[in-house]
Amino acid sequence: MKKTAFILAAIMVFAVSVSAVNKIRWKEMNWKIYETENFRVFYYEGAELLAKIAAVYAEEAFFENTRIFNYISKTKIPLFVYENRVDFTSTNITLSSLPEGAAGFTEAFKNRVVLPGSGSF
C-alpha cells in the first residue's frame, strides 16, 4: 500500500511539474539552416544577418577552443539563433522557463547551443 501511494504521488508531482510550463509562441517560425565548417546555424525569416554574424563568432570561438582543449567535434554543432528576447523566451527547445537575464543556453546531451539576439550588433 505504501509503495503504491508513493508511486502515485511521484507520478502526480511529475505530471504537475511538466504541465505547469506554458510558453506563448507569438509567431510562426519557418526555420532555415546556414551551414559553416563546424556549425549548423538554425534561424528564421528576419534573422538572416544575425545568423551569419553568429556563425562568424561561433567559428572563431570554435577555432580558439579547439586549440586550447585539443578537441574537434566529429559532427556539426547545432546553433539556434533567435532574433530577439521575446522569441528566445518562447522557445520550445527546452521545457524550462528561462530566467530574465539568460544570454543563451546549451544542452550537453544534444550538443546544441541556443542564443537570443540583443537588438544591436
Image: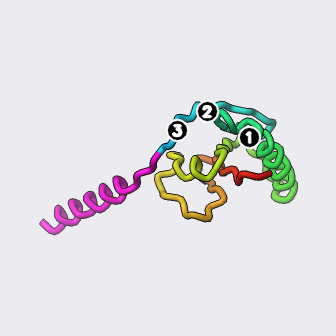
Q: Which residues are magenta?
A: 1-24
Residue 98, given in percent of the width and then of the height, sits at 53, 59
Residues under numbered marks 2 and 3 in contact, where contact means CB atoms less than 8 Å apart: no
Q: Earlier in the sequence, mark 2 or mark 1?
A: 2
How far is disc 2 from disc 3 in space, using C-alphas? 12 Å
- Label 3 to label 1, Cα distance in Å? 18 Å
- Decide if residue 23 is on the left or right side of residue 45: left
Q: Give the CA distance from mark 2 to mark 1.
A: 11 Å
**Which residue carries the number 3 mark?**
27
Residue type marked 2: Trp
Judging depth in this view, the residue of 109 and 86 nearest the camera is 86
User: The disc labelled 3 sits on which kind of residue?
Assistant: Lys
Which residue bears the numbered disc 2?
Answer: 31
Asked if marks 3 and 1 touch (Cβ < 8 Å), the reply is no
Viewed as shown, does residue 6 lie left or right of 84?
Answer: left
Where does label 1 land, which residue?
A: 51
Above or below: residue 120 compared with residue 80: below
- Name the mark on residue 117: none
